[in-house]
Each structure stands twice: as C-alpha cells, then as structure tokens.
Image: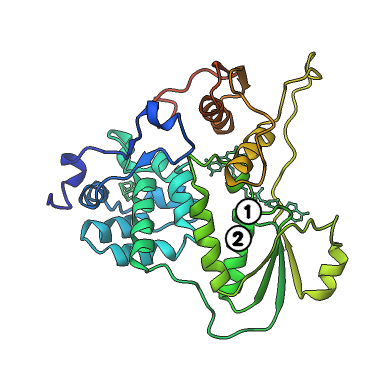
Amino acid sequence: MTDKMTGFIKIERKNYSKRPIEDRIKDFNEIYLPLAEGEMMAQANRCMDCGTSFCNWGCPLGNLIPEWNDLLYMGDWKGAYEKLALTANFPEFTGRVCPALCEAACVLGINREAVSVREIEQSIVERAFSEGWVQPRIPKVRTEKKIAVVGSGPAGLTLADDLNALGHRVTVFEREKKLGGLMRYGIPNYKLDKKIIDRRIDMLKMAGIVFVTNKWVGKEMELEEIKKKYDAVVLSCGTWVPRDLKIPGRELKGIYYAVDYLGQQTKSLEGTMIASEISAKDQTVLVIGGGDTGSDCVGTANRQGAKKVYQFEILPKPSKERDESMP
Ligand SMILES: Cc1cc2nc3c(=O)[nH]c(=O)nc-3n(C[C@H](O)[C@H](O)[C@H](O)COP(=O)(O)OP(=O)(O)OC[C@H]3O[C@@H](n4cnc5c(N)ncnc54)[C@H](O)[C@@H]3O)c2cc1C
Ligand code: SF4
C-alpha cells in the first residue's frame, strides 16, 4: 500500500464506472458500478489530511471528511462509518446525489483532481448496511413529548430521525402514497434507486417513528387539529411551485413541468400509476434548462424511447475542469 504521505502524488483519481450506455438506456436502474474495496481505500489515501480542510467547510453537513478518509485508508471501515454517521443522517442518499461541494472545495483540486469524497461516502455506508452496522436510533428514554412533522422529504426525514433519537414521539404526515419527497418523485430511479429510500424508512420505523401517508395537511386534515394533538409541529413541505416561462406559445399543448413529468415516470415504475401519462416515446423532445433537473428529463426521455432530444440552456457550456474563475 502506498504510504499516506505520498498517496496524493502517486495515486490518480479513479471514479465508479458506469453501465454501458446501450444497456442503461433500456431501463431505469442505477447507472454507477462501485469500485472494489481495495480501490476505494486507495482513493481515500489520496486525501492529504489537510490542516485546514476546506472539504469540511464546503460540506453543508460539516462531514468529518479527512477523519473518515484516514480511517478508511487504514482499513477501518466500521470506524469510518461511525465517524460519517456523526454528521450525516442518510449518507446513502448524499453519497449518491449530493452535488459534492466538498469536492469543489478540496485542496487537492487546486492542481490535481479532487478526492472522490462522494463515492467514498457511498462505499462506506453501503459496506455499513451490508455488515449490519447501520442500526435504528432507538432512544433509551422517552420524553413523551409528541411532535408532528409535515412532509417526508429529506428535511422531514432528518428532523424525524433526530427528534426521535432525542426521545420525542414523532409522527410524519405525508400527502403522497409513498415517502421521500422529491428524492422519490423528482430524482429519477437511475440516480437514486427507490429501494434505498425504503431501506432507510424501514430503519426509521424500527426506531419508533410513525408515518401517516395519503394525508394532505390543510386539505384532508386541518393544521389546527394537529396543533391540538401535538406538543410541536414542524412544517417541512418543500417547494413544489414550478417556475413558469411566460412567453408566447406557453399555452400550447405538449408543454409540461419537469416534476410532473419525472414524478409520473417514477409512479409508473412503482406501480401506483398504470402508465405514464406524459411519455416521450417516439417524440422529438425539447428540454428547456440545462441544470440537473433538465438532465434528469433528458435521461428520462431517452429511456422512454424519444426519437430525438434537444436541450436549450441560457448559459455557456461549463468547462469540464476548474478554470481560472474557479480557484
Ligand atoms: C428533478 C429534481 C432532481 C433533483 N436532483 C437532486 C440531486 O441530484 N441532488 C440534490 O442534492 N438535490 C436534488 N434535487 C433537489 C432535492 O430533491 C430537494 O432539495 C429536496 O428534496 C428538498 O427536500 P425537502 O424535504 O425540503 O422537500 P421535498 O423533497 O419537496 O419534500 C416535501 C414533502 O412534503 C410533502 N408535503 C408538502 N405539503 C404537504 C402537506 N400540506 N401535507 C402533507 N405533506 C406535504 C410533499 O409531498 C413532499 O413529500 C432535485 C430536485 C428535483 C426537482
Ligand atoms: S480538502 Fe481534500 S485533500 Fe484536504 S482533507 Fe479535504 S478531502 Fe482531503
């Protein structure tokens, strides 16, 4: 094994590989193929354990990245998981779909490729699940305070997990049939398999959290009613108001919002909708917007069998590597 002092010089960044395009376009299964454990440990060895670890500042969760990289380099997967779990409630979600601000902040990225923090995170948590190290956070003592959380997206689930671990009795209300918010009905399955969400929800249920689905607060149940029954109510409803484009022709048929389109596709896959109402099959598709949501629509349209897909973006094409404007 390369010694820790020189790992960042001798080892190149190696990413997960992707399933071949001709295969992955035929289904909605996850596209990434993880590296072998030894390769992941080598990638962790690229971390310089910086005195001022900008990755840690860049991470919105304040993940202890150099610490778990070091433990992984030494082969201590369990220790690495325990360190990761100190700050990240659901590393299996962030390890798949987080935009990895840590990597954009990584010091090694100044003149080499940044440490592959997100993939390392995913590897650690998947190993932890397979070894049974991920356990429900059951509190030793209950406060008997009752808390209602409205909305089961990542915000609501994190709140529920933490408040339950502190000993409160938590009930989550969700208007949809299934839990997970935009992780379930926005992000396509090929980026985040919904089994990954279900696995975590099972764990949260075992920890004592109660989930009430198909319950639209404010419509099927009054907020006042909840306020009377609970000591505290947290609203974590997300933002489901799409941004419209007020231009001539907007009223024409065949123009849809991304989340309606993506959500229908996921519902069709999970069997809660007979067929996707909006389908790109044999259609020529234009996606307006070149961000992540736009890319998700491109990927979905390709998988549905679109004849051709165009994508318009107002900004210039971003560079593949850091340029002088991104020091
Ligand atoms: C297409 C798409 C792709 C994305 N890709 C990524 C990505 O790759 N990486 C990334 O980091 N982020 C991504 N995001 C953003 C990410 O999904 C959101 O930032 C995140 O889901 C917000 O979490 P949240 O819990 O605040 O809200 P949401 O996920 O929106 O969850 C809110 C929940 O509250 C429920 N709810 C709302 N009102 C009520 C009510 N009155 N009663 C009961 N329930 C209610 C909703 O049904 C929903 O389940 C993407 C978003 C979209 C749309
Ligand atoms: S900034 Fe990069 S090299 Fe430095 S500690 Fe963080 S991940 Fe390691």
What numbered label is drawn on residue 157? 2
Cβ at disc 2 under 8 Å from ligand 1: yes
Residue at the (52%, 42%) spot, across then down: 189
Give the structural element (helix, strand or loop) at label 1.
loop
Residue at figure coordinates x 79%, y 17% from the top left? 252
Please name the residue that numbered disc 1 is placed on.
153
Do the CB atoms of the residues marked 2 and 1 lie less than 8 Å apart?
A: yes
The x, y position of residue 263, in whole percent, is 64, 40
Say above or below: 119 vs 275: below
Q: Residue 51: x percent and y percent?
A: 31, 54
Secondary structure under badge 2? Answer: helix
Q: Amino acid at mark 2?
A: Leu
Q: Residue at x 84, y 63 (%)?
A: 223
Q: Nearer the viewer, residue 10 or 206?
A: 206
Mark 1 CB near ligand 1 (8 Å cut): yes
On screen, residue 23 versus residue 139, left or right, reads left
Residue 121, image x, y percentages: 38, 52
